[in-house]
Amino acid sequence: MPSGTIKSYSAQKRYGFIDSEKGESIFFHASNVRPADREKLAAGKIVSFGERPTPKGMAAENVVIEAVAAKHYQALDQTDMIVSKTSACGKGNEVIHRLGRVTVESRDPHAAMDKLKAKARSAGCNALVNLQRDRRTGEAWTNNYKYTIHVLSAEPALVKRVQYTADREQASTSRANVEKEVRQLPARQIADEKVSDASGYSLALSLVGLFIFVMIIFAMGR
């Protein structure tokens, strides 16, 4: 009897798809699942089943849950770094490990993003999660010229594609490889990169001036 892993299942619609051991995607409906197993239907369950032809292709029947599949982690096929405003990183993907939040600044928002990606990439990460964007006003050192500084921060992360397998040895090897990758990530916080401008210096001077003014008033009142 053929076997496979449940790839997806909608409890609301009561149907899903099985990844067969032959690499085929097989449709199944809950009505064709053993009654005792219907409440257990979920992605990752290993099942055995019969097959019957339909006008839309093969469908599974007499589906029986045999076991729970183990996670098998695979490298992502990506041309660019994943960037997410939340901890989510794409369907079928999982955040394996996150580093501490890193902040970069630039007068160019695109340059700020490039710097953030470069820092994550140099640390061995392939994603940026929980991205936050902000702006502040910079001030020139030599005059009163002010400009916008773009502030980006995120958590560099290691993300893998998750699949399920009945092969426990394959799953164990996969987990060991991922743990090795995590150990190779930097233990220290990645350094922030901020724009050096006179805004902080101006604030300090203002506070010093205010302090002197208060002291003068205090002295005159004595």
Image (spheres, helix red, strand yellow):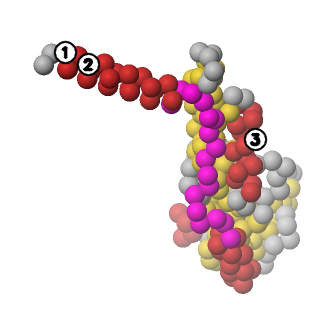
Q: Residue at x 75, y 49 (%)?
A: 118
Please tell me whether mark 3 or mark 1 is closer to you in this view: 1
**Distance CA(mark 3)–CA(mark 2):** 50 Å
- The spot of residue 50 in percent (x, y) is 77, 71
Q: Are marks 2 and 1 in contact (CB under 8 Å)?
A: yes
Residue closer to the observer: 133 or 7:
133
Determine if the magenta segment contains residue 186: yes
Kind of element beneath mark 1: helix
Q: Amino acid at mark 1?
A: Met
213 with respect to 119 (left or right): left
Neighbours of disc 2 within 10 Å: few (<14), some (14-19), many (20+): few
Q: Amino acid at mark 3?
A: Asp
In terms of image quadrants, where is residue 215? top left
Neighbours of disc 1 within 10 Å: few (<14), some (14-19), many (20+): few
State whether residue 211 is above or below residue 67: above
- The spot of residue 183 in percent (x, y) is 64, 72
In terms of image quadrants, where is residue 210? top left
Q: Amino acid at mark 2?
A: Ile
Q: Which residue is mark 1?
A: 220
